[in-house]
Amino acid sequence: MKKAFAFLGEHRLFTFFAAMAVLVVTVAVLSPLIVPYDPYDAVTREALQPPGAEHWFGTDKLGRDLFSRVICASRTSLFSAFLLVTCVTVIGSALGIIAGYFGGAADSVIMRVSDMMISFPGLVLAIAIAGILGPSLTNAIIAVTAVSWTKYARLSRSLVLKIKSKDYVAAGKLSGSKTKRMLFRYMLPTSLPTLLITATMDIGKMMLELAALCFLGFGAQPPTPEWGLMMNEGRLYLQTAPWLLIFPGAAMFVVVVIFNMLGDSLRDIMDPRHRRAGRRRKEVKHA
């Protein structure tokens, strides 16, 4: 326990943004219980009311409480981003580890497909795939996964190629270790920290890409509360009811910044150069 508190005290930036991320996730999980109004309850006589004591963020064109919808949208947007990052990380890492470890035809096929996907603008290709599959949040996640796995495949492949040259891997092969053991005992655990850091840093990016598809009508559909969709619904009222754009946009901005900074601080902790610099600072302090 003392070591945990010492770690948190030493890495205050990470501690702060980790606490903020936990708070955001907690709000998302408990959102149905903490909102003052039903986010789907339309009261047309109260449409487009400005922020006030009764409706903190105002109301939308159907008279629905915007604060309730923004809070409930955190659940949709955040967990969709988590699911997307998980899919991209698992699929891309698995393909990259296979390509790097086995080489040969497997490496050529996976990397050529990766090169082909990279040659297209990612968001444009995701829009095309989502358009073919049809507008829904599930299809939007599939579309972004299809164009985003290449980053993790190339990263994990490079890590595996570096690990393969180590003496302990050669010793494992000579001792007759099976392929499954080599992959799960050596390749995956050694690559996992870098992949997890990259995944944490990509949560904000994936959330923005999903929001972009929802904004364009290829993701979540009405009346589902989702930040990108809410901004699309509010763009027509930019001059008369700007709060319809301001509050969903501000919520998305805050959450993206929190997870980006969390990823940056985690990378600084895991970076060997950062650890060496920290040890030198301690030595100078105690000298």
Image: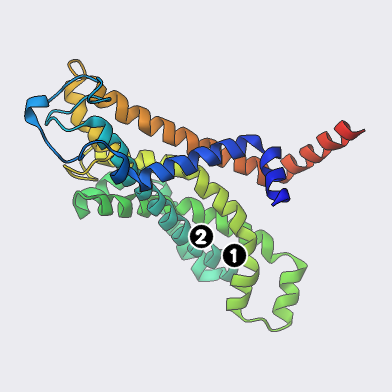
Looking at the picture, how far across and down is residue 67, in whole percent? Answer: 27, 31
- Of the numbered discs in the image, which one, if any, rests on residue 188? 1
Looking at the picture, how far across and down is residue 72, in whole percent? Answer: 29, 41
Q: Are marks 1 and 2 in contact (CB under 8 Å)?
A: yes
At 53% from the left and 65% from the top, the residue drawn is 99
Q: What residue is shown with label 2?
A: 93
- Of the numbered discs in the image, which one, if any, rests on residue 65? none
Say what amino acid the circle numbered 1 marks: Leu
Is 192 in front, or is 227? 227
At 82% from the left and 34% from the top, the residue drawn is 281
User: How many marks do you count on the picture?
Assistant: 2
Numbered disc 2: secondary structure: helix
Is 105 in front, or is 224? 224
Residue extending farthest right: 287
Say what amino acid the circle numbered 2 marks: Ser
Could you tell me how far apart the alpha carbons at marks 1 and 2 are, in whole angstroms?
Answer: 9 Å
Looking at the figure, which quarter contains the C terminus?
A: top right
Asked if residue 212 can be seen in this view, the reply is no
Asked if residue 86 can be seen in this view, the reply is yes
254 on left or right of 237: right
Looking at the picture, how far across and down is residue 172, in whole percent? Answer: 72, 76
Looking at the picture, how far across and down is residue 163, in whole percent? Answer: 68, 62
At 28% from the left and 49% from the top, the residue drawn is 140
Numbered disc 1: secondary structure: helix
Q: Earlier in the sequence, mark 1 or mark 2?
A: 2
Q: Image quarter for residue 39?
A: top left
Q: Is residue 175 above or below residue 55?
A: below
Mark 2 Cα-neighbour bin, 10 Å: few <14, some 14–19, many ≥20: many
Q: Is residue 46 above or below residue 178?
A: above
Q: Image quarter for residue 87?
A: bottom left
